Image (spheres, rainbow, N blue to C red):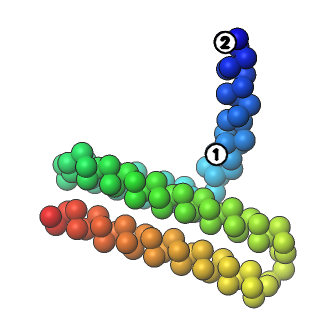
Amino acid sequence: MKFYLISLLVRKFKPAISGMNYIIKDKSIMIQFFIGFITILLSLFLRFKVFELILVLFLISFIIALEIINTAIENLCDLYSLEYNERIKKIKDIMSAVILFSGLIAVIIFILLIIY
């Protein structure tokens, strides 16, 4: 019974682990991880309170999740067509704008945490 449960867990998490292997090879996502790591170090250096650290971690994970979704959508678009396509460009640009907008909001929140 115990072995069955472990085997079941491994089978359930195998696609997620495979996905993690893909995302750690993506430069954009790794840049977000690096920025997140620097942000955590800065937060610790500034002696943020626990709630503030939780907020920072949430914002970092949110931005990384958006970057992962962006990468998935870009891959779907490339699956549709590798040739230049104005509609695919628009989709990719919109997703980039989502990440930029969210990143700017995260920066504003981080600055407010430092100020107050």
Q: Which residue is mark 1?
A: 20
21 sits left or right of 116 in the view: right
Q: Quadrant of residue 39?
A: bottom left
Give whichever of discs 1 and 2 has the lower sequence position: 2
Rendered residue at 67%/20% (across/down)? 6
Q: Quadrant of the N terminus?
A: top right
Residue 43 makes an appearance in the image = yes
4 sits left or right of 108 in the view: right
Q: Amino acid at mark 1?
A: Met
| Secondary structure type for disc 1 | helix
Residue 34 makes an appearance in the image = no
> Which of the two residues, 41 or 10, is positioned nearer the viewer here?
10
45 sits left or right of 4 in the view: left
Rendered residue at 34%/55% (across/down)? 56
In the image, farthest residue toward the left:
116
Rendered residue at 63%/52% (across/down)? 23
Q: Which residue is mark 2?
A: 2
Cα gap from disc 1 to disc 2, whole angstroms: 26 Å
Pinpoint residue 86: horizontal percent, then vertical percent: 75, 88
Q: Quadrant of the C terminus?
A: bottom left
Check disc 1: other Cα within 10 Å, few if <14, some if 14-19, many if 20+.
few
Q: Quadrant of residue 80?
A: bottom right
Check disc 2: other Cα within 10 Å, few if <14, some if 14-19, many if 20+.
few
2 sits left or right of 37 in the view: right
Mark 1 vs mark 2: give the one in front: 2
